[in-house]
């Protein structure tokens, strides 16, 4: 998943979390947001390891 896809997924999940037709759908969207945040955190952590020094 590239950065653009992650941004698009996050935007979609935010909309569904706010306006989803059911409780289950909104909960699933919130779970997707948590996963997107974790992907970003792990990318940042990995990038920090790639820095020499």
Image (tube, rainbow, N blue to C red):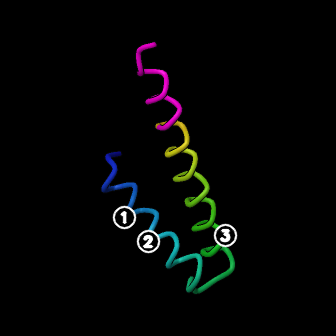
Vertical side of 23 occupied by 11: above or below: above
Q: Which of the two discs, 2 and 3, labels the residue nearer the N terminus?
A: 2
Question: What residue sits 36% from the left and 64% below the top?
Answer: 8
Residue that label 3 marks: 27
Most common secondary structure along the magenta stretch: helix
Residue that label 2 marks: 12
Percent across and percent down for residue 23 are 69, 79
Q: Are marks 2 and 1 in contact (CB under 8 Å)?
A: yes
Vertical side of 43 occupied by 22: above or below: below
* Mark number, residue 8: 1
Task: State which region is magenta.
Answer: 44-53
Q: How far is disc 2 from disc 1 in space, using C-alphas?
A: 6 Å
Q: Quadrant of residue 28?
A: bottom right
Percent across and percent down for residue 22 are 64, 83
* In-image side of 44 versus 4 (left or right): right
Q: Quadrant of residue 5?
A: bottom left
Percent across and percent down for residue 13 are 50, 69
């Amino acid at each position: 998943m590239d950065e653009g896809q992650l941004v698009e997924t996050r935007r979609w999940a935010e909309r569904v979390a706010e306006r989803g037709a059911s409780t289950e759908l909104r909960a699933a969207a919130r779970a997707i947001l948590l996963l997107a945040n974790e992907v970003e955190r792990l990318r940042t952590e990995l990038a920090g390891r790639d820095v020499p020094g």
